[in-house]
Amino acid sequence: MTQQPQSTTAHSWAAGGTVLGGVLLSILGVLQVFQGIAAVAEDDVYARVGNYVYKFDLTAWGWIHLALGVIAFIVGIGLLKGANWARVGGVVMAALVVIANFMWLPYTPWWAITVIGVGIFVIWGLCKDWGHKYT
């Protein structure tokens, strides 16, 4: 029985984190698009919020989620294809999705918390072994 060198095992874990990040970011992108379409199409889908610091018109929130979703999906596909720009883009897009869903908390609290958790997991997966050199 042969053992794999440590660098090969570490590289496979890092690659697995990148692939998982790409898949999750793509799925988050699609879900953000659906969330945005629901907010744009029907303003009465989501509950009305009273006084809230980050209160926008629901149509504006819908367009924000729609744009974030499309870009996140494209970056997620870039991650799966191994594009160099996609790792930085993935971290940035996941952070923007987390921030947008934090501000979206009063409208759908449980869903927003779930998306925030997945977004943080994507950031962790993409940053896990970012600067590690494999030989």
Image (cartoon, helix red, strand yellow):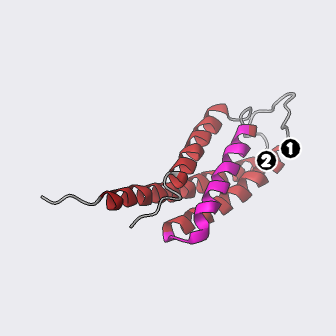
Write down the residue under mark 1: 57
Quarter of the rendering containing residue 11: bottom left
User: In the visual, does 5 lie left or right of 54?
Assistant: left
User: Would residue 30 be counted in the magenta stretch?
Assistant: no
- Considering the numbered disc 2 on the image, is that residue within a helix, a strand or a loop? helix
Residue name at image x 61 percent, y 69 percent? 85
Decide whether residue 84 is among the magenta residues.
Answer: yes
- The amino acid on which the numbered mark 2 sits, given as a three-letter code, is Trp
Residue at 37% over, 56% down = 10
Can residue 52 be seen at all in this image of the molecule? yes
Identify the mark at residue 61; answer none if there is no mark: 2
* Closer to the camera in the image, 52 or 12: 12
Whole-number angstrom distance, CA of label 1 to CA of label 2: 6 Å
Which one is nearer the viewer's eye here, 7 or 11? 7
Q: Are marks 1 and 2 in contact (CB under 8 Å)?
A: yes
Q: Nearer the viewer, residue 25 or 83?
A: 83
Q: Secondary structure at mark 1?
A: loop
Q: Residue drawn at (37%, 59%), measured in percent from left and top?
A: 12
- The chief SS type of the magenta part is helix
Q: Is residue 57 above or below residue 130?
A: above
* Residue 73 in view in this figure: no
Judge left or right: residue 111 versus residue 50.
left
| 40 vs 116: above or below | below
Residue 17 x %, y %: 46, 54
Residue at the far left: name it.
1
Closest to the observer, 96 or 129: 129
Q: Is residue 5 above or below residue 38?
A: below
Residue count near mark 1 (Cα–Cα under 10 Å), binned few <14, some 14–19, many ≥20: few
Q: Which residues are magenta?
A: 81-102
Q: Residues within 10 Å of mark 2 (few under 14, many from 20)?
A: many
Q: Amino acid at mark 1?
A: Asp
Residue 93: image x %, image y %?
66, 55
